[in-house]
Amino acid sequence: MVDTTYQVRGMTCGHCVSAVSAEVGAIVGVRDVRVDLASGQVTVSSEQPVDTEAVRAAVDEAGYDLVEA
């Protein structure tokens, strides 16, 4: 299992957490998504490393911004 943490900007409520979790969770190979609303961190657990651009697209689809590392 591979855990990767991303920083997401723009989340302010539980609905934001649900939207990001659903979109990122739909990426092929993702097993779990944990969102910390206070810090804006999204941790993705997957069998193999997930393409950052796929995560960026999912976060964008949810209406938020993936912050550059």
Image: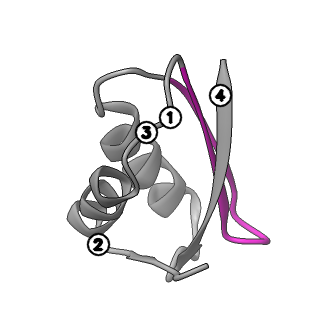
Left or right: where 16 falls relative to 43 = left
Dot 3 falls on a residue whose secondary structure is: loop
Image vertical order of residue 19 relative to residue 48, above or below: below
Q: Amino acid at mark 4?
A: Val
Please name which of the two marks, 4 or 2, marks the residue nearer to the observer.
4
* Amino acid found under the numbered disc labelled 1: Pro
Q: CA distance from mark 4 to mark 3?
A: 9 Å
What span is in magenta? 31-46
What residue does disc 2 label? 63
Residue position marked by numbered label 4 in the rendering? 2
Indicate which label's residue lies in the foreground, 3 or 2: 3
SS at mark 2 in the image = loop
User: What is the crowding at mark 4: few (fewer than 14 residues within 10 Å), some, or many (at least 20)?
Assistant: few
Q: Is residue 34 left or right of residue 25?
A: right
N-terminal label among 3 and 2: 3
Residue shown at the point (38%, 75%) measured from the top left: 64
Residue 25 is a magenta residue:
no
Question: What residue did someone put label 1 on?
Answer: 49
The residue under label 2 is which amino acid type?
Gly
- Mark nearer the N terminus (1 vs 4): 4
Q: Quadrant of the N terminus?
A: top right
Residue 2, position as x, y percentages in the image: 65, 28
Q: Identity of the amino acid at label 3?
A: Val
Q: Are marks 4 and 3 in contact (CB under 8 Å)?
A: yes
